[in-house]
Amino acid sequence: KAKGEQAKVVKSAASKEAYWDVERLTQELQGKRSLIEEANAKIAELGEKEKQLKEASEERENERRKHADEEHRDRMKKLEEEFESRKERLDKERAERERLATKMEKEQAMTADAGVLDLLSDMKAAANSPRLAVGGDGGSTQTADDAGGEEG
């Protein structure tokens, strides 16, 4: 009988120890589950933050691109306006040069015509001038007989 009681006490002590081991392991398991749940919540939170940061970054990048596109479009428009302005000015200058060249050609032609007319006028005046006429005495002609030559 004493031996049986001793076995019960041993069984009882072993049972208590096993019970407390299970209880301790259960508590550790619950603690680790809590840590895992907290870590998962933190991971989800960080994932959401990352998503928000990514969206904000994409939004900033889109704004930067939009701004850069607007600046590029404005620069191109300004360059086009400058080009058109210069082209217009050069076209006006070319037209003015052509007008002046045409005017100069006309003036040269008129000067040349006037020179020809002056020359013709001088020639006509010379042809009608008595002192330049043939014979030198107003147009009469002398023969050798009239000039006191020999009669035959």
Image (spheres, rainbow, N blue to C red):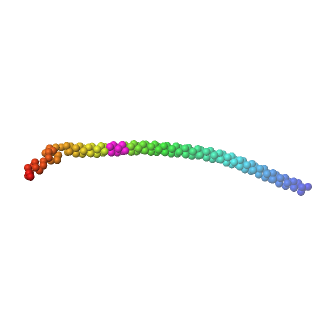
User: Which residue occupies 85% across, 54% down?
Assistant: 11
Q: Is residue 65 left or right of residue 18?
A: left
Tell me if residue 98 comes above or below residue 13 in the rendering: above
User: Which residue occupies 16% across, 43% down?
Assistant: 130
Tally the numbered discs. 0
Of 124 and 28, nearer the camera is: 124
Residue 100: x percent and y percent?
A: 34, 43
Give yes or no for residue 98 being in the magenta stretch.
yes
Choose top left, top right, bottom left or bottom right for residue 108. Answer: top left
Instruction: Let me know if residue 102 appears in the view.
Output: yes
Q: Which residue of the protein is positioned furthest toward the right in this rendering? A: 1
Of 67 and 84, nearer the camera is: 84
User: Which residue occupies 55% across, 45% down?
Assistant: 65
Residue 140: x percent and y percent?
A: 14, 45
- What is the quadrant of the N terminus in the image? bottom right
Q: Is residue 97 left or right of residue 81?
A: left
Choose top left, top right, bottom left or bottom right for residue 62. Answer: top right
Q: Is residue 144 left or right of residue 116?
A: left
Q: Magenta segment range?
A: 97-106
Give yes or no for residue 129 being in the magenta stretch.
no
Residue 69: x percent and y percent?
A: 53, 45
User: Which residue occupies 33% across, 45% down?
Assistant: 105
